[in-house]
Amino acid sequence: MIKEIFRVLKPGGICYFAAGNRMTIMEPHYRLPFLSIIPRPLAHMYMKISGKGNHYHEKHLSLPGLQKLTNNFISHDYTKKLINDPEKFQTEYMLKPESFKHKIAKFIATYIYWFCPTYIWILEKPHIQPDLKYKFKPNL
């Protein structure tokens, strides 16, 4: 899908990109701790044992995987900005300013960014096309 977004955007065009992190404690779809982190065969067993399903379909990426996925774009990272100033971005309903949750989120975003549960980026297609021979190639 990201290849198609890149293809159809005009140079300078932008795309809102929000992605969950594989390295999150609580898996967001099934609300099972560590589900996205453990190996897939164990995740399938965990799903069965918990009664939430027979197969874990989601394939979340970690921060390096997301960066690689979007490496042909210029990435404008809004994750820390949203966390640091939820009122400015009207996200205080999720992250009440100066609450314990807000303080933990600010700590994670500042010191262990790779562990943020979600990333919010604006992806911009460069005006000059990158050298695609070292990046992804569209399937023709």
Image (cartoon, helix red, strand yellow):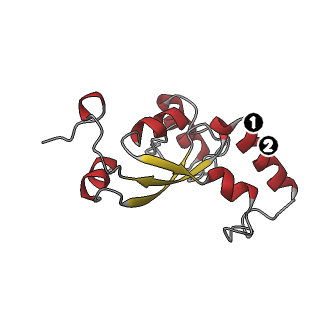
Residue drawn at (87%, 59%) of the image: 98
Which residue is at the front of the view, 19 or 106?
Answer: 106
Q: What type is the residue that disc 2 sits on?
A: Phe
Q: Position of residue 48 (x, y in %)?
A: 53, 41
Q: Disc 2 marks which residue?
A: 107
Considering the numbered disc 2 on the image, is that residue within a helix, a strand or a loop? helix
Label 2: how many Cα within 10 Å (few below 14, some 14–19, many 20+): some
> Residue 55 placed where, x, y %?
45, 42
Q: Residue furthest left?
A: 140
Tell me residue 34's x, y (percent).
64, 37
Q: How many marks?
A: 2
> Which one is nearer the viewer's eye here, 82 or 31?
82
Residues at marks 1 and 2, CA–CA distance in whole angstroms: 6 Å
Q: Tell me the quadrant of the picture where the C terminus can be found.
A: top left
Q: Nearer the viewer, residue 107 or 38?
A: 107
> Image quarter for residue 115?
top right
Horizontally, residue 58 falls left or right of residue 47, namely left
Whether residues under marks 1 and 2 lie with C-beta atoms below 8 angstroms apart, the answer is: yes
Amino acid type at mark 1: Tyr
| Residue 64 located left or right of residue 27 | left
User: Does 56 sit left or right of 110 as displayed?
Assistant: left
**Mark 1: few/some/many CA within 10 Å (<14, 14-19, 20+):** few
Q: Is residue 12 above or below residue 37?
A: below
Name which residue lies at 84% across and 51% down.
Answer: 103
List the residue tagged with mark 1: 111
